[in-house]
Image: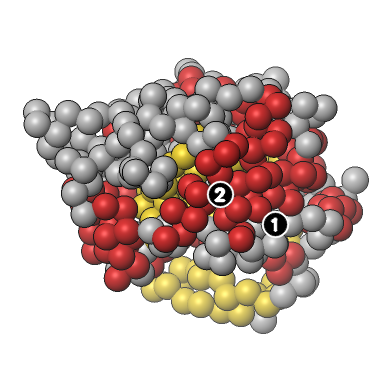
Amino acid sequence: MHFAVLIFASVATMTTFALDNGLMRTPPMGWLAWERFRCDIDCTNDPKNCISENLFIDMADRLYEDGWKELGYVYVNIDDCWASMDRDKDGRLQADPNRFPGGINKLARYMHDRGLKLGIYGDMGTHTCGGYPGTTVDKIDIDAQTFADWEVDMLKFDGCYSNAVEQELGYPLMSKALNATGRPIGYSCSWPAYQGGLPPKVNYTQLGQICNLWRNYGDIQDSWSSVLSIADWFFENQDVLAPAAGPGRWNDPDMLVIGDFGLSMDQSRSQMALWAIMAAPLFMSNDLRTISSGARSILQNKMIISINQDPLGIQGRRILKEKSGIEVYWRPLSNNASALVFFSRRNDMPYRYQTSLSKLNYTTGSYKVTDVYTDQTDVLKDSTEFVVSVNPTGVVMWYVSAPGKLQYHPFIRGNKLHRQTYDVKQNNFL
């Protein structure tokens, strides 16, 4: 099958349903506290890392001052353990007064003054996963209005301490309640993760109508085995999951752990590449105050971000699994472009993988390919055999421009870099 057919089928599916709040037309990007900082509430002994308004202000400052915001990382998301153990006298949730003395609304204003957005965490159940007050069905309306009054921009709605019947009732009700507030609030549902992530228990048509994004699978941990197991589940079930995604409705494989402790640089490049192919939300969970330059360069890679944020919003797929341990992933992009990832499951040494674009079902023509991590470019005919050297647990990722258009191609002559117009139809310089 030619990829053009796959693109048409995906686009046709994409128009059938979507949450009607106009939000998150591309995958949301930002920072989320949970994986890196968990439920650290010991502000006496660990004031810099505890879940407090100071932590979120610090991360907002880093997004604002260190070039993250301009790249699209605009959400600063509070996760569990922010609340007081008791609701106020009117039955409303309230922030812990010692760790959030200014309250959530003040924090939201701080974000908005810097062009950022604030996300918050709730739970469809009697308690949150960390044991804080949850949102039972009778509290959905008041909690939705509270979040709107606080000027929150996103809600992550977890599902601990609830059953399947309560979730089936509560998740759609929260969507309706958020929309009824009149404030645009992106809605992240954890519902499918609690129901095994797959049909028939999970109805992805319904999810696309009520949620902007949803957690399908278990929590990510700071390890390569965790990243790999999540990626494997998503791509093994891609025939079910990929059609569910599109502008305003995204599968969420969980946070980016790049910049923490568990991944090598090659594994970090792999997570970023595979999440971009999946059209996944890009929520970093790391310490932006101390992040290494290597991790920063991966997370701030403009070409990978542009692939992730492609407005078509088509989730990519794994198209080949070789006996050698090399896998190939593909995602169609706007303007008839595409992204390719060559990923190695090997642990021994770099592997030289040989193929051609025609073997990967590209149609006849010449293509400009750009390695997104090295910025090296080349022009390849579909029939030209090429070799990519893929490091163990690493990737080579290409942006592939559409055929039949003039490209400007750099070349060396007399030790000087020149640019000359290249006709990819004729596979020759003009």
Residue at figure coordinates x 26%, y 52% from the top left: 103
Task: Identify the amino acid type marked 1.
Answer: Leu
Whether residue 48 sits left or right of residue 103 in the image: it is left
Picture residue at 41% right of the left edge, 32% below the top: 133
In this view, the residue in front, 138 or 413, is: 138
* Label 1 Cα neighbours within 10 Å, binned few <14 / some 14-19 / many ≥20: many
Counting other residues with Cα less than 10 Å from the Cα at mark 2, is it few (<14), some (14-19), or many (20 or more)?
some
Q: Secondary structure at mark 2?
A: helix
Q: Amino acid at mark 2?
A: Asp
Image location of residue 416, percent across then percent down: 39, 73
Q: Relative to the observer, which residue lies in front, 282 or 158?
A: 158
Of helix, strand and loop, which one carries label 1?
loop
Residue 421 vertical placement versus 2 (above, below): below
Q: Is residue 312 above or below residue 164?
A: below
Q: Which quadrant of the view contains residue 193?
A: top right
For the C terminus, which image quadrant? bottom right
State which mark lies toward you, 2 or 1.
2
x, y (%) of residue 139? Answer: 53, 41
Residue 131 visible in rendering: yes
Say which label, 2 or 1, has the lower sequence index: 1
User: Label 2 belongs to which residue?
Assistant: 141
- The reply to whether residue 307 is in sight is no
Q: Quadrant of residue 152?
A: bottom left
The image shows residue 38 at horizontal and vertical percentages of: 33, 30
- Residue 284, above or below 311: above
Residue designated by label 1: 19
Residue 103 or 372: which is nearer the viewer? 103
Q: Nearer the viewer, residue 78 or 181?
A: 181
Query: In the rendered view of the protein, which quadrant contains the N terminus?
Result: top right
Is residue 6 found left or right of 207 in the rendered image?
Answer: right
